[in-house]
Image (spheres, rainbow, N blue to C red):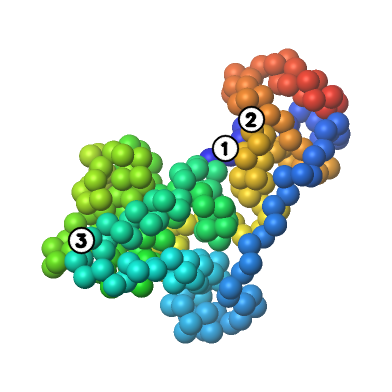
């Protein structure tokens, strides 16, 4: 995801009183329709969903609702391998990989049909639970990056299943992607949703990034509000900031009529 930490720090250090000249609000997101009530006690959440964290409870509920709505005739397929393949293809036909969804809550993923490996894993697991396929979460590292997949039991035999890399054509329905190192294995939808995004607010920085990215923009947030520049200029600004090139940074701000000290 396009975090822009260097950009935020650089802007903060340039001028405490900086006033931005370009303010756009058209990328503001609407929050999804939440399922789990907010404000219950930790004990109530625990008894309902097996965890006391509301955002995880909400993730579980969202996945279960999606699976219920999408199980269709899959549940009636007798052959387990055919049934699991249908589950995987249902999820992969629904989702498009998009790194900007790594931190926003999975409810945004379900709303928009976009997500990352943890979202693929959680939705597939939810559909497995609905359709009678035994599966647990496998968490680890692939090419230096955190990565999730499933370990499924088909006809009594356990297999790894990397949904994200199946969707991209790297592996088949079953099989571990080369280079994957498993760090943990086990757990259901609660475990899966601790790996999905935790940011629920439409005003959170990661959700703003997600929305702006749809039209090739990135946000800059300061005490005066939220402002947008193109993604290409945001990447260039980051390069200038990393190199300590203040004049280069100013040139980006000038392009958007953003005053600077």
Q: Position of residue 128 (x, y in %)?
A: 32, 67
Q: Is residue 28 above or below residue 143?
A: below
Mark 1 or mark 2, whichever is nearer to me: 2
Q: Which residue is mark 2?
A: 231
Mark sitting earlier along the chain (2/3): 3
Residue at 47% over, 46% down: 96
Pointers 1 and 2 in contact (CB under 8 A)? yes
**Mark 3, residues whose alpha carbon is within 10 Å: few (<14), some, or many (≥20)?**
some
Q: Is residue 60 visible?
A: no
Q: Are marks 2 and 3 in contact (CB under 8 Å)?
A: no
Q: Indicate which disc residue 81 carries.
A: 3
Image quarter of residue 195: bottom left
Q: Earlier in the sequence, mark 3 or mark 1?
A: 1
| Percent coordinates x, y for residue 53 in the rendering | 53, 71
Comparing 184 with 208, the one in front is 208
Determine the secondary structure under disc 2.
helix
Mark in front: 2 vs 3? 3
48 vs 222, left or right, is left
The residue under the point 45% across, 62% down is: 194
Judge the density around disc 1: few (<14), some (14-19), many (≥20) Cα neighbours within 10 Å: some
The answer to whether 54 is drawn above or below residue 163 in the figure is below
Give SS at disc 3: helix
As displayed, is residue 60 above or below residue 148?
A: below
């Amino acid at each position: 995801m396009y975090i822009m930490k260097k950009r935020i720090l650089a802007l903060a250090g340039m001028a405490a009183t900086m006033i931005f000249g370009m303010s756009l609000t058209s990328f503001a997101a609407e929050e999804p329709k939440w399922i789990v009530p907010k404000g219950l006690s930790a004990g109530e959440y625990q008894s309902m969903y097996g965890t006391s964290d509301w955002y995880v409870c909400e993730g579980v509920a969202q996945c279960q609702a999606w699976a219920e709505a999408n199980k269709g005739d899959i549940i009636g397929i007798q052959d387990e391998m055919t049934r699991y393949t249908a589950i995987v293809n249902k999820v992969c036909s629904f989702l498009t990989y998009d790194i900007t969804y790594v931190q926003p809550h999975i409810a945004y993923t379900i709303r928009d049909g976009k997500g990352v490996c943890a979202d693929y894993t959680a939705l597939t697991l939810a559909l497995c639970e609905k359709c009678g396929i035994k599966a647990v979460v496998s968490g680890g590292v692939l090419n230096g990056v955190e990565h999730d997949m499933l370990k499924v039991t088909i006809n009594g035999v356990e297999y790894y299943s990397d949904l994200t890399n199946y969707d991209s054509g790297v592996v088949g329905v079953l099989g571990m992607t080369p280079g994957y190192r498993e760090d943990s294995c086990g757990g259901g939808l609660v475990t899966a949703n601790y790996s999905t995004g935790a940011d629920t607010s439409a005003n959170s920085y990661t959700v703003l990034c997600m929305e702006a990215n749809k039209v090739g923009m990135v946000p800059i947030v300061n005490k005066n509000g939220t402002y947008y520049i193109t993604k290409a200029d945001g990447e260039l600004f980051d390069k200038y900031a990393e190199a300590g090139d203040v004049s280069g940074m100013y040139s980006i701000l000038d392009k958007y009529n953003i005053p600077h000290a």
